[in-house]
Amino acid sequence: MIETASVNGKITALAEATVPVLDRGFQYGDSVYEVTRTYGGVPFLLDEHFERLENSARLSKIKLSRTRSESLEEIKRAVTAAKPLAGEDVFVRFIVSRGVGALDLDPATAGPNTFVVIVKPIPPWKKDFYDKGMILFIPTIRRNSPRTLDPNIKCGNYLNNILAVAEAKEQGADDALCLSVDDKLTEASNSNVLFVSGSKVLTPLHEPETDTGNLRGITRTLLQSLCKEAGIVYEERPLRERDLEKMDECFVTSATREIMPVREIRSSSGPRHRFTEGGGATTKKLQELYGQYIEKYKSSHNAEAWF
Ligand code: PDD
């Protein structure tokens, strides 16, 4: 495929796409975005991604200048222009910035939105991440509090997550597992984190009234319903670093990583926590259920295929 971008409907090769320097997405990270992908040409869980985008826009007081169907048309045009081969899976990032404005924080000075679509191949995650699992490091930097910048706003300001992943990489780990400012586990830099303890799947609770929060991941929400169907207990609850001792398995979820095992969690102060390499029995079961769900989704949504 040809890596492609669309900026307010203008389609170019990705490397040539530009936004104005006065765009507030560029100036302030004043934008919201989504990442989805296709399976066999079928866009995956697009309604859920649009709902989350609209929620992020509402929480950031960004007025959307395009309707869902107008946005969808621009996305489809960009995907078609990328000329993916039949069966090739594409990564789609769509970004809504508040728009171009004066150099003034007042959001009333900006608009209409800048709508950007990026179409690329799915990130080539290291094979080792699935065969063995990732190493996560608990950095000193804390995840934004829902009372400052709510992690449920999937916004263009990822500096918090960037600093976390930078610290993790400096320590030789693959990604970060961030604590909240009130010392609870939150999420990895761009994925949710889940654990298996005995027969239960556990994941940090989003607690908007406190300082602990994480993004309501669409992959994790899907997993919640797959657990329910399979009779596996799934619980969102406050979790702390000391709870890691009780965890038998660990994995992260996101649209592009799907279900990726974690083999070790390190921190500068505490002990190392090791989990089954390549994921334990429950992680593998969930990967299997996820794969089956995708196959069913592809056939039941065939009419919506983009290519
Ligand atoms: N990231 N938490 C954060 C901070 C994220 O950025 C993401 C997604 C997730 C998982 O959400 P989902 O299951 O809906 O992909 C959790 C995307 C993939 C990204 O920024 O590339």
Image: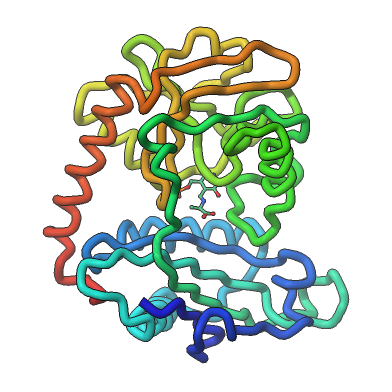
* Residue at 38% in and 56% down: 48
193 is higher (above) or lower (below) than 257: above
Front position in the image: 236 or 307: 307
Residue 210 in percent (x, y) is at 69, 30
Residue 266 in percent (x, y) is at 63, 22
**Extreme residue in the right direction:** 104
Residue 180 in percent (x, y) is at 70, 30
Front position in the image: 277 or 142: 277
* Residue at 71% in and 66% down: 30
Q: Quadrant of the N terminus?
A: bottom left
**Extreme residue in the bottom direction:** 10
Horizontally, residue 163 falls left or right of residue 12, namely right
* Residue at 63% in and 35% down: 176
- Which image quadrant for residue 258? top left
Residue 105 visible to the viewer: yes
Front position in the image: 243 or 89: 89
* Residue at 49% in and 43% down: 216
Residue 211 visible to the viewer: no
3 is higher (above) or lower (below) than 10: above
- Which image quadrant for residue 119? bottom left
